[in-house]
Image (spheres, grey):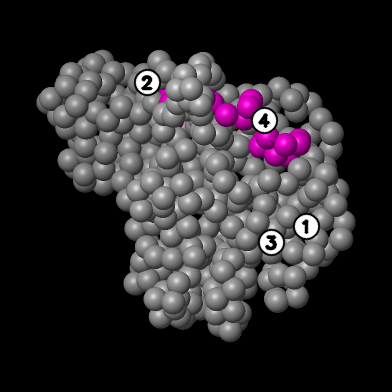
Amino acid sequence: MNHSNFQIPELVAGIRNIATLNACKDYVEAVYFSLDSLSLRARAKDITKKSLPEFVQLIHENDLKAYLTINSVIYPQDMEELNNVMDIAKSSEVDAVICWDPAAIIKALDNDLKVHISTQANVSNIESVEFYHSLGAERVVLARELSLDNINDIRKQTTIELEVFVHGAMCQSISGRCYLSSHLLGKSANCGECTQPCRWKWSLVSDDGTVIDLNGNYLLSAKDLCMIEHLSELVDIGIDAFKIEGRLRDSRYISKVASSYSRALSYLNYDDDYSINLSLLKDELSSVYNRGFSTGYYFGNSSKHNFMIEHDMNASTTKKKAIGIVTNYYNKQGAALIHLQQGSISLGDVMVIEGKTTFLEQTVNSIVIDGVFVEHAAKSNEVGIKVDQKVRKNDIVFKLEQNQKSFN
């Protein structure tokens, strides 16, 4: 299987701050992100209108494209904010705005900004694609409910750029247009405040009051999308961009998923051990946060096998345990001083250090207490550890452990 004559799609990862940018910058061609308003990820507040110009500049300095997501419903009271955001997006020189509300589309085009139509528009046929094309959109992110055959049919009939999701959380409702959170708790998913009731425990009760046993209680929780083993089919169709969902995920998740898909795309140029390589990459994906994996709708309608009803949120094979914080960094020695407030650490452990601008994952190769090299340090100790890159005061230190609840 050699795809050297095909154009390898642009890999696009969702990020929320400088740390997640640093975690994926070596693996992707573009990143998408949102501000602290007008987004379906309202909890992602690290990037503001004030910080946007500097953030976009940093993205461009890493030779990546910067896509700003404005995908919430636009109400009358939001119009002034929309105008302000579009003005700043233009002056910040974002490479495109991902949106779907006609108000956002019009304002973006009026500001000479490139437009990518969000999956929130639920674009599912060629007529819809060409409608947005006629408005001036450069790219359409297709609905996640389409099959490979559907996508192939659309690709053959249009020249506009097409983008599809290849990895990440699947929503219970069509293209994320969900009202369950709003009805239950007054928190609208369409305005970025989803409380994820589809991930709660539910019981199925018959008309006579009998509770029906379905071997689980997470009846609405869809498995995560994972197309790592099927990228070649999408490349053959001629998809322009692959999107990784996860703007609220941590830096380790973004790094692991982005690097796995980057390597999977590089394998397309080689015949040897292709399937084996992809299987190993899927194992790596299983090591970070997931709800189990499925291929979504790509190979037909979703079924009960696309739901993980018997387990709770995290099915990863490993988990991060917080063990302390960085109290100092010594640049000349390339070492961090770490206060082990919550746990111990030993030589050979894999530690993760995260902060707003920091992401580091490495094996612990040295531990020093009061100038003495040791093999193990207990909780409450302050230790010096050689680190592979700069870390910062108050960065959180984690230790990777096996997740006993894993079912991958």
Distance, label 3 to label 4, CA atoms, is 26 Å
Q: Residues within 10 Å of mark 4 (few under 14, many from 20)?
A: few
In magenta segment, residue 310 = yes
Residue 226: percent from the left, percent from the top?
Answer: 62, 35
Viewer-proximal residue among 404 and 100: 100
Q: Amino acid at mark 2?
A: Glu
Q: Residue at x 60, y 40 (%)?
A: 167
Locate residue 305: give its quadrant.
top right
Q: Which residue is mark 4?
A: 303
Q: Are marks 3 and 4 in contact (CB under 8 Å)?
A: no
Is 234 on the left or on the right of 104, as rendered? right
Residue at x 66% of width, y 47% of height: 144
Q: Judge whether 237 appears above or below 162 on screen.
A: above
The majority secondary structure of the magenta stretch comes to loop
Q: Earlier in the sequence, mark 1 or mark 3?
A: 1
Amino acid identity at mark 3: Val
Residue 89 position, x and y percent, is 48, 74
Ranked by sequence position, the earlier of labels 1 and 4 is 1
Checking the image for residue 401, the label placed there is 2
Q: Position of residue 330 (x, y in %)?
A: 23, 43
Tag 2 secondary structure: strand
Q: Is residue 308 magenta?
A: yes
Residue that numbered label 3 is attached to: 140
